[in-house]
Image: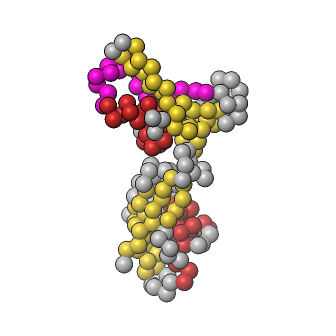
Amino acid sequence: MLETWVVAPTCLPVVLRRCHACASERFRADGKFRVNANHKLIDAWLLVLCTTCGETAKLTVLERTNVRSVRPALLDRLHDNDLGLAAELLQDPALRRRNRIALDWTDAWRLDTGGSDHRDLDREVIDVAVRFTARIPVRPVRLIAEGCGLTRAEIERLIEEGKLVSAARLTGKLSGDFTFTLKH
């Protein structure tokens, strides 16, 4: 029987970018946008606040874009300061590249194992599918250790012994769905 674990965000990640006021490198987004229209052209920014000094920085969402080419639903979400839109935009690699930012997902996600506790299971083989609801880079060893109630060292030992196998690379970080099999 294949179990499904879900990795989901609990809040917006910290935006990593240098602050011009205090040289800090951590900003938080709270879903606020600024929209400016000049005749037929529109600009829109996601506002982020420095976690040290509170200085506001703007992440470009739309730049000198013809108003008619912007979907009305997107404009409504920008004007409503939609937190979900902020989350979607921070996931966009093009927006991150254009604004030269990175994201820090530390303490901004959770693992839902569906209530299963593998320490009490007597099954010989456990098959698990891990699904990500957002592109959150996480070390698979950490996920599996947390989900199984084991230490990372124990998980690494199981990988070396061939008792924990996956088609995905379990070293490094992953941000996409994968499956693994644990053999007792």
- Looking at the rendering, the stretch of residues picked out in magenta corresponds to 56-71
Side of 132 where 50 appears, left or right: right
- Using the image as rendered, state which of residue 90 and residue 123 is in the foreground: 90
Q: Is residue 117 above or below residue 92?
A: below
Q: How many numbered circles does the render carry?
A: 0
Residue placed at 52% from the left, 62% from the top?
Answer: 111
- Asked if residue 171 is among those painted magenta in the image, a careful observer would answer no
Q: Is residue 78 visible?
A: yes
- Using the image as rendered, state which of residue 168 and residue 57 is in the foreground: 57
Residue placed at 56% from the left, 39% from the top?
Answer: 30
Residue 173, x across and y down, in percent? 50, 53
Q: Is residue 102 visible?
A: no
Please identify the quarter of the rendering in which residue 104 is found: top right
Residue 184, x across and y down, in percent? 49, 82
Q: Is residue 148 above or below residue 100?
A: below
Residue furthest out toward the left: 68
Q: Is residue 75 above or below residue 184?
A: above
- Using the image as rendered, state which of residue 135 and residue 145 is in the foreground: 135
